[in-house]
Image: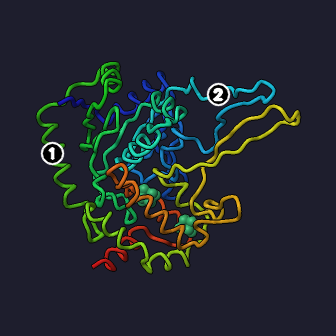
Amino acid sequence: MNYHILQKDNLDCFIKSLAKLMKVYAPVAKGYNNFAFEEVTTAGEITLPYIPTILPPKKFFMPQREKMLDFDISKGKPEDTAPLDAPELALFGVHTCDLAGIQSLNMVFSERPRDYNYLRRKEKIVIIGLECNDYCDGHASCALVGNHNPNGGYDLFFTDLGDKFIIHVGTQKGEELVENMGLAKAAVADYSALEKVREAKKAAFKNEIGTDQKKLAEIFAKGEKSKVWQDVGSRCVSCGNCTNVCPTCYCFDMADTINLDMKTGSRNRTWDSCQFQTFAAVAGGENFREERAERQRHRYFRKFKYPLDKFYRAFCTGCGRCTRTCMAKISLKETLKALVAESK
Ligand code: SF4
Ligand code: SF4
């Protein structure tokens, strides 16, 4: 077992030392009950505990807009401008739901054809996770998918033991960091305290959806024609916020910008949303998901059915962001509960 200890009084020293090595991003309060991963240089700028940030850490792995390549049609072959020199940075305080989100994106972007922009950035990012000792708010459903507990995906992982953090070392990169910082090894009493935290979590985190994660694929297979989709579709305004804030939504659009010389230009990609009416429109005027109900069903199937069939894991991390952001008050938990009730 490779666990170390950091006294809370020394968190500031830890952040300052880390900030000397690389840029550090951590949860910072942004108005009432809103948080964002922003650059910090001291612990005083960080707010803990926090409810999931407005945007998940995916913004560091796949920015909202990025240039993929420059081209000059008079030369023929495009120049590769993928970010070979992506800067090294550390994300501090990443919740277990967001660690699961990054793990999902890793699976998607590691598939052939690989996404080298994503993979090069990922190599340079140090991930420091933080355990939630209690539910962040009523919108989270992490207990349904088991993401309230750590399941890897970090270099270091912090658990709050009151006056100190116990830190699990997950990778070689993490090992080097704790050695650099000179953090003491955990003692037997610290392991007992960690066990008590995990034991208390069993009562605090309840799956409220009324089914087991393993049954979701079957429930969704049966629910293709459910009236639930008509209900959420009638309320949805197709703003696309739910997909933008989702830690596992990765769809993007590509567009070429041509300069006035009509020879040179660049190819850029931007986050897209399956909730936009034009998302599934194709040449010839056909639109495969013209109705909002169809697009809502698609969003849920992309979380609870298709990735289970392909990657054997749900792509909903239970973070609750889609519900928090939805101006039509469409709740992921309520939609799932209605679908489960209908399947019985
Ligand atoms: S945030 Fe709500 S209203 Fe907007 S697209 Fe998503 S479900 Fe529809
Ligand atoms: S679907 Fe909603 S609750 Fe699930 S991961 Fe995406 S934003 Fe979070």
Answer with mark 1 or mark 2, whichever residue precedes in sequence. Answer: 2
Which numbered tag is attached to residue 195? Answer: 1
Depth check, front residue: 257 or 329: 257
Report the quarter where the C terminus lies: bottom left
* Drawn side of residue 164 relative to residue 330, left or right: left
Which numbered tag is attached to residue 259? Answer: none
* Drawn side of residue 36 relative to residue 272, left or right: left
Residue 184 at least partly seen: yes
- Disc 2 residue type? Thr
Residue 320 at least partly seen: no
Mark 1 lies on a secondary structure that is helix
The answer to whether residue 232 is above or below residue 271 is below
In the image, what residue occupies the spot 25% across and 60% down? 214
In the image, what residue occupies the spot 53% across and 57% down? 243
The answer to whether residue 158 is above or below residue 311 is above
Q: Residue 260's x, y, as percent?
A: 88, 36
Please tell me how crowded label 2 is: few (under 14), some (14-19), or many (20+) other residues with Cα within 10 Å.
Answer: some
Mark 2 lies on a secondary structure that is loop
Q: Residue 296's x, y, as percent?
A: 51, 68
The answer to whether residue 278 is above or below residue 154 is below
Circle 2 residue: 81
Which residue is outermost to the right? Answer: 261
In the image, what residue occupies the spot 42% across and 37% down? 92
Q: Residue 305's x, y, as percent?
A: 38, 60
- In the figure, residue 136 lies in which quadrant? bottom left
- Disc 1 residue type? Glu
For the image, the number of numbered tags is 2
Q: Residue 147's x, y, as percent?
A: 31, 52
Quadrant of ligand 2: it is bottom left
